[in-house]
Amino acid sequence: MDYPIYLIGYMGAGKTTVGRLLAQKLGWHFVDLDDAFAEINGMTTGEYITRYGVEAFRKLEKACVEKLSELPIQKVIYATGGGYPCWEDNMECLKELGTSIYIRWSNEHLARRITLSGTENRPILQNKRGQELLDFIAWQMSGREEYYSQADHIIDAPLAQGSPDDNDEQIAQHLYEFIKESQK
């Protein structure tokens, strides 16, 4: 397995939560690319998209990933933005930079997880609820699955019945064991 590790998947898949838990278990660094984007560019991804549009955001998001890849640390877990792998050659770049892992959920599970966490900080999902949210996720996933499925590894969720926190912990533990095994 090549380092660093990039967690990919749709909004609400748990990339940030799982990434933090996994990095803690491994004793590695963790970087949420949305947070890094905000730190580098002085505004959140949502603010940037609202002000300048998705296309301009994607260009700067890619530049952010490239800038971070130049840092001299390898044992890092990155949580990408949900759309990052689906723009231009980003999926190929991730595979060149390290190992990509897709956290795959059904559309119904994603809708439930997003509803629980709220849509306030997700500009493209604001005011979407219930069937409208599910339909939107299904529509986006129909175009994104081909990119996500190019990941080096895919983990199908949920791994446990219970709360989203239980599932995120189970996924982090599963990935921890997988990474430890691959290091042998």
Image: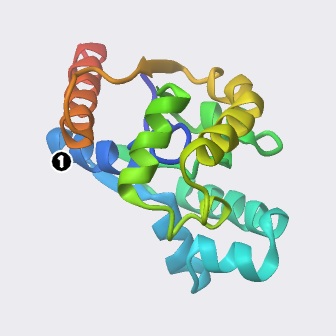
Image spot of residue 71 (x, y percent): 48, 59
Q: How many marks?
A: 1
The quarter holding residue 163 reads top left
Q: Is residue 63 above or below residue 52?
A: above
Q: Is residue 48 above or below residue 112?
A: below
Q: Is residue 41 left or right of residue 108?
A: right
Q: Nearer the viewer, residue 173 or 97?
A: 173
Q: Is residue 95 left or right of residue 74?
A: right
> What residue lies at 27% left-to-right and 50% top-to-bottom?
20
> What residue lies at 28% left-to-right and 20% top-to-bottom?
159
Q: Residue furthest front?
A: 131
Q: Is residue 157 visible?
A: yes
Image spot of residue 127 (x, y percent): 60, 65
**Residue on which disc 1 sits:** 24
Image spot of residue 14 (x, y percent): 38, 43
Image spot of residue 35 (x, y percent): 46, 69
Q: Is residue 115 above or below residue 96?
A: below
Quadrant in which the C terminus appears: top left
